[in-house]
Image: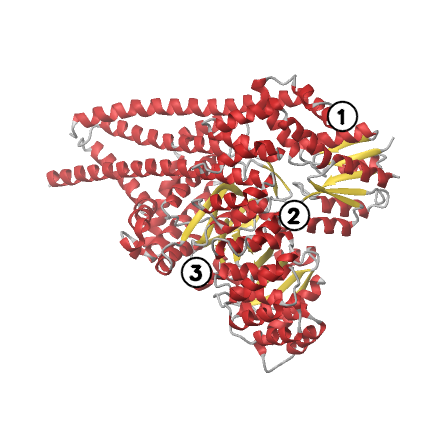
Amino acid sequence: MISITLLDFLLYVLIFFSSVIILMSLILISLRTKGIIQDKKFKDFSETYEEHLFEYIESNEHPSNFLEQIKERKIPLFLRLVRDYAVHLRGRDFERLSGLINSPKIFNFLRKDLRSNNKKRVLRAIYFFGLSRNQASLIHVKEALKSQNDVIKINAALSLAKMNAGNEIVEIVKSLLTLKHATNDLIISILVEFDPAICSILESRLDIAKNDRVRAIYVSVFTKFRFIPAAKKVLYYLQYGTDPELTLSCLKYFMVIEYEPAGNALKFVLLKSSPTLLAYALKAAARIGTKELEEIIYEKLFVESWQTKLDSAAALYEISITGKDKLNKLAYDLDHPAESAIARMVLSEKEISGK
Amino acid sequence: MTETLRTVIVYINYAILLYVFFLMSTYLLLSFLSFFGIKRYFRKTSYYDRRNIFSSLNHIPISVIVPAYNEQNGIVENVKSLLQLEYPEFQLVVVNDGSKDSTLEALLKNFNTRQISFKPWYNLKSEKIRAVYVSTDYPNLIVVDKENGGKADAINAGVNIAKHPLVTVIDADSILERDCLLKIVVPFLEDKNVVAVGGTIRIANGCEIEQGNIKSVGLPKSILAKFQVVEYIRAFIFGRTGFERINSLLIVSGAFSCFVKETVIDIGGFKTGSIGEDMEIIVRMHKLLRKKNPKMKITFVPDPVCWTEAPENFKILKSQRTRWQKGTLESILAHKELLFNPRYKLMGLIGFPYYFFIEMLGPLIEILGYVIFIISVLFGWVSYYFAIVFLCVAILYGIIISILSIILEEISFTKYPKLRHLIEMLFLCVLENFGYRQLTTLWRFSAIIEYAFGKRKWEKMEKKGFQKVEEKNEK
Amino acid sequence: MKNIVLVEDDPSIAKLVEFKLKKTGYNVVRFVNPVGVMDYLLNNNVDLILSDVMMPVIDGIEMIKEIKKIEKIADIPIVLLTSLGHESAVLSGIEAGAADYIVKPFSTVELVARIRNILN
């Protein structure tokens, strides 16, 4: 017989497990019930105050008048309601709503949240300060930038960007670079929340930026805002930058901004780059469209890599009428089967989509 | 003689107890890892608007590959809903894998296509491509017609034609949420070392579906499907999240997964003729790419983005589970040098052994365990009472794990809106241990035996809209 | 009094727009998605359709195409509501025959002005 003590042990485990199961089931059901109750509370709140809110938005009523009827403990529900509308609106409607958030009653409530230990409350406060673009809260949100918590840092940066806090740009970028998982994409997506005027500030900081990675980020922001004044500097970094990310950023800029002096630099990029960079360089070259570039693009059709062949063919089609003609001729060139196949493919695809 | 036999059996009993203890501790570990993994994912996405990817220029264009075989009943509707996916730049490559029905005709007719000259740019192994068409109405829709070669083969053909740096592979009858591409691209944007990302799959049976979109979520009527709902929640919330934390994800669902195209080409594409091509390629990726880039990552997105139809009758469910088990056997055994191999760090030391002993050999040990236990009880070597108590402990533990995953689902995605859904799921967690789990284990066991005796043909399922009938594939 | 059909799945925007349009003096009928819209258009007198582009089930563009096929209702002006970043959808919409479009986030003042313009 197997020892009895093991059996006793198992019996205790049995009882323990059964209690755990009952406990977990209760937890589960209470979690759901809590959620249902909260949703119901919000629904009731909306139904009561929605019409008033709409009337308020229409009118010139002072925010405090409207807020008088909202009890302090209902403010979270109120914020949720405002958020539902504010994200969709702009112009006067939006101003009316942000007026509510900036009123003393709500502002103080959010201030208290910001100083609390509860991460959810802090995030909520940061979010609404950013939403209302209230300059008075700037200094408080800036404090949150220093938080150890990544999510709070990101949201603080996002809110500062919405507030268009151009003076804090250095702090913001510095803080974002210290994130545990800081990718360029994340930082760029935050910076583009600023007003386009941020570009001038970034341009002035391009040379003194910490490193090429930061420069690549700034150039991406220029690209997003189609900031033409930066072209000269971006060209400089295309020619002399060593970091491939920066080169890529600059190429993407010239894909969007037509800047003829970049033609020369592009020549060099085309002649000595990796297939990934080539893909973008070819598109940029097609935009600028000088004869010299056209020749180089044509030559690229004959390299090994399929991807480059395809990108070159596409660029040739875009660059000029002579380019299209060259492609047409190539399509029937029996001496170069691979290239003619690519040419035929690109031509048939482009003709169909009518580009 | 009986004495030695008795001692042997007793030791085997202890071994089985040890195995069970090991199993339970692994599940416990996985649950902790999952809990933190999901919490982390949530904090990241709580106030962050994914639509930012639209505004930032740094989205990565995606080619969505859809292998299709005999899908005439649903293919047009599904492709239409796929075209509505929210993403700044994507291409849809539907690969007709030599269908015997009118799948191709349906596609060509409904999307106003024109044949184009094509040149497959890469040389992944696939059967002959007969023609390539582009839709005039939707220029980002490409239809590839090729000779039949099986799913892996069709995917390879799709990769050969795809023009974007990321390729997403989906099943033709999967129902995807509109923002699935926005969600699945995030790991690639966050870490340049990510080579593959899997999505989370849920059961579509019981959900209200209109024109290829989920209108509302509900529980299925069929009891078999109900069990599978709980199973999938458990598998994804535990299995995947847990392993992802130690970079030991050995499988991403064929129903919805995304890869870096370069990587797929570098390792030679999907293995044609394999039973479980989705697992096979991932294991191979771990094996080959870790050497080149030790920082390589394979991860998954816990957000449910893909809804699939689960089998509702025993025959088809059995065939599905058999196929999965054989696929696991094939993939794990083909790369068995990873077992306990310190060169692969945690994956070699913990992840792979888990799949080897628990996923692959588990059913064998479990059935053996039952048999030994029964023998021991019949011969009086183990008290009948003990056996019952032990069985109860094992069952209760299984219930705890299931309820834990339902709780995790509740604090994260809460896809099942009604309270009665929740209560029903609680009952299912208990009920599944009285027949369903044993049945699936038995099927997996017989799959292992079949595999050991060389029966490795892949049996294909033919779909009739939402009805399934089994059919043998040529390959 | 002019009749406007509003097709919008987001309940918040729908309610606000409905309120604003009613305040301006129009009659508004709300739909959550395009299902049922066709029937309503065929059986009632509708002066303008205001519709979101990205909706579950059938998207706004498909709906426009269906409407333009039927002579009786093809002339009803259609205004699209679209989110930032879905410019291609807008182009498809205009190509399909939509009269105008408004990008979210939007201003209700502007919305009303455009609608008033079209209806006169």
**Identity, as a three-letter code, of the amino acid under mark 1:** Ser
Q: Is residue B345 left or right of residue B317?
A: left
Residue B400, compared with residue A232, is above or below; it is above
Give the label, 2 or 3, closer to the camera. 2
Q: How packed is label 3: few (under 14 Cα within 10 Å), some, or many (20 or more)?
A: many
**Image-quadrant location for residue C35:** top right
Q: Which residue is mark 1?
A: A59
In-front residue for pair A69/B467: A69
Question: Residue C85 has which mark?
Answer: 2
Q: Chain of mark 1?
A: A
Q: Position of residue A148 (x, y in %)?
A: 42, 37
Q: Position of residue C113 (x, y in %)?
A: 81, 37
Q: Position of residue A134 (x, y in %)?
A: 61, 33
Disc 2/disc 1 C-alpha distance (Å): 32 Å
The residue sitting at 25% across, 34% down in the picture is B374
Q: Which residue is mark 3?
A: B271
